[in-house]
Image (spheres, coloured by chain):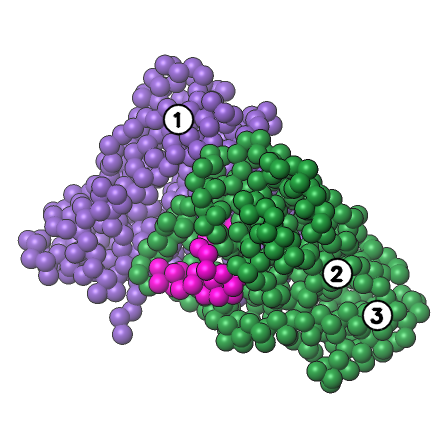
Chain colours: A purple, B green
Amino acid sequence: MIKKYLMTPGPTPVPEDITLSMAQPIMHHRTKEFKSIFNETKELAKQVFQTKNDIVIFASSGTGAMEASVSNLLKENDKALTVSAGKFGERWGQIVRAFGAEAIELKYSYGDYAKPDDIDKALKDNPDIKAVYIQASETSTGVFHPIDDIGLMLKEKYPDVIFVVDGITAIGAVDVKTDDWNIDIMITGSQKALMLPPGLAVMSVSDKAKKTIENVKNRYYYFDILKEIASDGGSYTPAVTLIEGLNLSFKKILDEGLDNLFKRHTLLAKATQEAAKALGLKLFAKRPANSLTSIEMPVDSTKVINLMKDYGVHVSNGQGELKGKIIRIAHLGYFDKPDMVMAVSGLEIALKKLGVDIPFGEGVKKAMEIFVEE
Amino acid sequence: MIKKYLMTPGPTPVPEDITLSMAQPIMHHRTKEFKSIFNETKELAKQVFQTKNDIVIFASSGTGAMEASVSNLLKENDKALTVSAGKFGERWGQIVRAFGAEAIELKYSYGDYAKPDDIDKALKDNPDIKAVYIQASETSTGVFHPIDDIGLMLKEKYPDVIFVVDGITAIGAVDVKTDDWNIDIMITGSQKALMLPPGLAVMSVSDKAKKTIENVKNRYYYFDILKEIASDGGSYTPAVTLIEGLNLSFKKILDEGLDNLFKRHTLLAKATQEAAKALGLKLFAKRPANSLTSIEMPVDSTKVINLMKDYGVHVSNGQGELKGKIIRIAHLGYFDKPDMVMAVSGLEIALKKLGVDIPFGEGVKKAMEIFVEE
């Protein structure tokens, strides 16, 4: 028997009580009972998103909400700035083009983060840009973009530009102030910090975004933001069991308290990052996110990951050009201190077995020291 | 305590073993283990769909697959024939127009069914129609369209026209021969006869449809049929728990055997229909489906439904103009003989309480007789 520990940046483990909440008898979606859960869930979402804006929940992966934020906002030939520093940033450009709009791509190398000044310049050079699309945390590299500074810069200098943030590995893990940071559309998915199985996308939509959407006619039906906002309990059959799980997930997050939640994620990130450094390893992200840690490997990372798997700890490889170069350890959602010690121990054992010269034991020791100091 | 019995045409009850299969620890979607489940599930789907065509599974409601079958097949200004005899037929027209194509609507009154000759005539009058969109069973009225005759007529007279069938309340309940009946795209959703929570759409796609899709450039990203067919384990994060449930659902269906499954549904439909007639009530559908029975009510059906609910039996009202006029009793998926007796008893008790003159007891007696004769 090898006991499995899922430590990938999505899907992440689901707490037992949430699993049980989704194993109840099926509820009909047009009942008062379900509508009340659905509406309460949206209200809870506002607290977790730190927003007063409307909430929309789609039965889809997070990509569905990314698509909605493009197809509902952009007309044919509209210009959008897409910020790309990894696989998910590139996805913005692909979606914008798929809907007949023009993507002006601000491209950074993998591991790097967006600079507000670059965005300022791109907007100055292209005054007809209608919206800026970016990630909060770029899951493929573990970078956290300074969406606070970018949002505040946009608010001051380009108040008409719509600001869309993919917060799929940020919401519920990192302190993201949707309203204070001028974020018109904030997106997340169920299978990350929300501690649920995949299948739901959640987004908040500002009044400014809604006004823009009203004047757009692109092509969409299922991902219709205004229709969902106007609907009572969802336009089509919602994923009722996942919504019940989401309701409990938000309650658990708010019971822990957002401040405690953010502190826990900050601590887990710090322990993982410092443990890697104590082993003489290099962090891949130039501005690491608190939701996952990507670490450069001195040997083929696929070998490291396979040995960690033999030990029971499942972490992620790099994607695309990063495959074989980095590992990505998740600490968003249902994770705590012992999980991080376990992950680092797996990494140390794998590297040792591969003959890499590391100060064996110093990684876990460093993580433990950080937990003592806390 | 009022024990609840969900007898609505979707969502439908989920068998306990399927619920448990979805309550297992979360699996990562890029593992061999999950990909093998995903690929096996597609193979099982082919058997249930009675097709050799490719299978696509989306994380969405059934409407997502309906949209994909429009956005992937039709270009701007392409002409499509949409057959409408209820709320879901109307949805075809809405989706076609949302994607910039022209919907020629063949409209029947609610309760009526499509005639192959009418479709033939519409295609003769509009030789540039590219695709025909229809339901197998129109869930809002309980009608089953003769998709066998329509499919065979199309095959003979209009071999280039793509035939798209929404089988959301048919697949897994009614004998629908996708390949034999010339159906290029067949669609279903998880929360009907597949006995799962809502959240998945499943579709089969013929080579003819794939060839058409290759030459189309409309606007979509998430619902990309060819991308999904080419992907190994889904292009975006699949709804892993629902896929695990779907895998077991297909196995249960095939273990029962398609013939037995269709016989069971035919029997349950017959018992429900004959019970209604024995009570002096009128069936609303001119060509009733084996998946649900819609019955005209001599009093406000909302009152009947509420009294049935007090008794524990949850059935559906009419939709739109049919609200207050009919009730809809489901018998697709996880239903058996005693369920039908229970449903009819609830109907009788409700009508009696409302002072309607019915031969009390004759409905359940009739259903029981049919089960004895069987």
Q: Is residue A243 magenta?
A: no
Q: Nearer the viewer, residue B189 or A17?
A: B189
State the mark number for residue B122. Answer: none
Q: What kind of residue is marked 1?
A: Ala
Cβ atoms at labels 3 and 1 below 8 Å apart: no
State which quarter of the image contains the N terminus of chain A: bottom left
User: Closer to the observer: label 1 or label 2?
Assistant: 2
Q: What kind of residue is marked 3?
A: Lys
Q: Dot 3: few (<14), some (14–19), or many (≥20) neighbours within 10 Å? A: some
Task: Specify start and end residues of the magenta stretch as a single range.
Answer: B34-60
Q: Gap in Å between the C-alphas at discs 1 and 2?
A: 51 Å
Q: Secondary structure at mark 2?
A: loop
Q: Nearer the viewer, residue B268 or B350?
A: B268
Q: Secondary structure at mark 3?
A: helix
Task: Indicate the position of residue A359 as horizontal and vertical percent values.
Answer: 9, 54
Which residue is labeled 3 in the image? B277
